[in-house]
Image (cartoon, grey):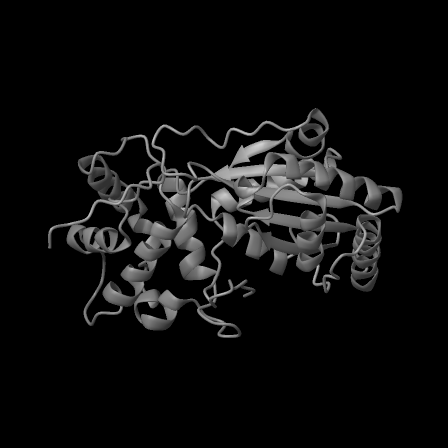
């Protein structure tokens, strides 16, 4: 049992949406692009995807070195951008250094890290890429050109958040870049999916209860740990996927959401966690009922999730 854990020590459950994103990344690389754009609403698993890529490499055909960089306000100036990029490579930034020297340091650092790892690709993951100034994308072209001239393959994964301001009517991250930026990095631009239906839910729960360790080296999943006797029977959490989807959809529609919906990964993880730590571990438990499933859905805040609007409605309590 081999499990990847995120920065908070939680096991990462490879979802159908994550597998789709990894497949699209591999396809863009094989098509000789220098990058790809992936987007979703908040809590759909983009950061988890980035952590997975940085920690687990067997999904990719080429050995690579990966770095995740979270964007903050770096503006569009070349010097500030190069300093940011160098810092994300783990290099000490030298004040008032000429840009050409900074480019040289980027090339030498990336080349050295690849050589030490015996890798052929440097995968740079830009989280919250929607916060980049559109003009800053040109600097990725400059870096890519310098690395390519030195025989180094760079691949940039841009992770965009949809509806990243409070405007309800905002379109999905409208971005205008130079043609060479789009042709290198953003010709491929795809959604990161959440839970899209019963099949996605069943796959997630199957891996959660059968394949993902509860802690590093534990050799057992959390559900099997808290209810070992239950798993000696024919019970499996995934058999409740249809009930979960039916009740979750009903609750979402009652809260004003579309019946054709997609659930955030974080909410579904919380549902699985609640069912494990509050329900299946109870003495005498044998199978889920509707009330228990609804309690887990309420716990996850699935009904109130709205990835479009940032408006906060204060209660009178």
Residue 146 quadrant: top right
- 60 sits left or right of 71 in the view: right
Question: What is the quadrant of residue 310 in the picture?
Answer: top left
Residue 159 appears at what percent x and percent y? 55, 43
Q: Nearer the viewer, residue 124 or 79?
A: 79
Nearest the eye: 60 or 265 = 265
- The quadrant of the rendering that contains the N terminus is bottom right
Place of residue 185 in the rendered image (x, y in percent of width and height, measured from the top left): 67, 35
* Residue in view at x 47 percent, y 71 percent: 215
- The answer to whether residue 180 is above or below residue 250 is above
- In the picture as drawn, the residue positioned furthest to the front comes out as 96
- Residue 60 visible in image: no
Does residue 5 appear left or right of residue 306 in this picture? right
Q: Residue at x 20, y 41 (%)?
A: 251
All told, the count of numbered labels is 0
Residue 68 in view in this figure: yes
Q: Residue at x 81, y 56 (%)?
A: 105
> Which quarter of the picture shows residue 258?
top left
Name of the residue lying farthest toward the right: 150
Q: Is residue 76 above or below residue 172?
A: below
Q: Nearer the viewer, residue 35 or 23?
A: 35
Residue at 61%, 60% in the rendered image: 55
Instruction: Answer left or right for 19 relative to 288.
Output: right
The residue lying furthest to the top in this view is: 179
Q: Where residue 150 sits: x, y (%)?
A: 88, 47
């Amino acid at each position: 049992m081999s499990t990847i854990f995120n920065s908070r020590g939680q096991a990462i459950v490879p979802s159908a949406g994550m597998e789709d994103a990894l497949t699209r990344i591999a396809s863009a690389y094989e098509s000789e692009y220098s990058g790809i754009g992936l987007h979703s609403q908040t809590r759909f698993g983009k950061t988890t995807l980035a952590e997975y890529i940085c920690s687990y490499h067997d999904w990719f055909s080429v050995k690579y070195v990966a770095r995740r960089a979270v964007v903050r306000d770096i503006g569009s100036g070349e010097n500030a951008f190069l300093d940011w990029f160098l810092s994300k490579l783990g290099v000490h930034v030298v004040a008032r250094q000429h840009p050409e020297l900074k480019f040289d340091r980027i090339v030498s650092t990336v080349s050295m890290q690849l050589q030490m790892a015996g890798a052929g690709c440097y995968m740079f993951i830009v989280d919250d890429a929607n916060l980049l100034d559109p003009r800053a994308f040109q600097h990725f072209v400059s870096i890519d050109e310098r690395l390519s001239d030195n025989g180094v393959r760079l691949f940039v994964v841009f992770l965009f958040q949809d509806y990243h301001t409070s405007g309800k009517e905002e379109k999905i991250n409208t971005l205008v870049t130079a043609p060479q930026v789009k042709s290198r990095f953003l010709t491929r631009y795809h959604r990161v999916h959440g839970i899209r239906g019963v099949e996605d839910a069943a796959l997630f729960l199957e891996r959660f209860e059968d394949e993902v360790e509860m802690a590093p080296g534990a050799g057992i999943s959390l559900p099997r740990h808290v209810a070992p006797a239950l798993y000696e029977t024919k019970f499996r959490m995934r058999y409740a996927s249809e009930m979960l989807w039916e009740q979750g959809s009903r609750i979402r529609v009652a809260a004003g959401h579309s019946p054709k919906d997609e659930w955030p990964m974080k909410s579904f993880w919380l549902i699985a966690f609640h069912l494990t730590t509050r329900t299946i571990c109870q003495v005498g438990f044998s199978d889920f009922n509707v009330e228990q499933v609804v309690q887990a859905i309420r716990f996850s805040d699935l009904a109130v999730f709205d990835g479009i609007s940032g408006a906060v409605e204060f209660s009178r309590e």
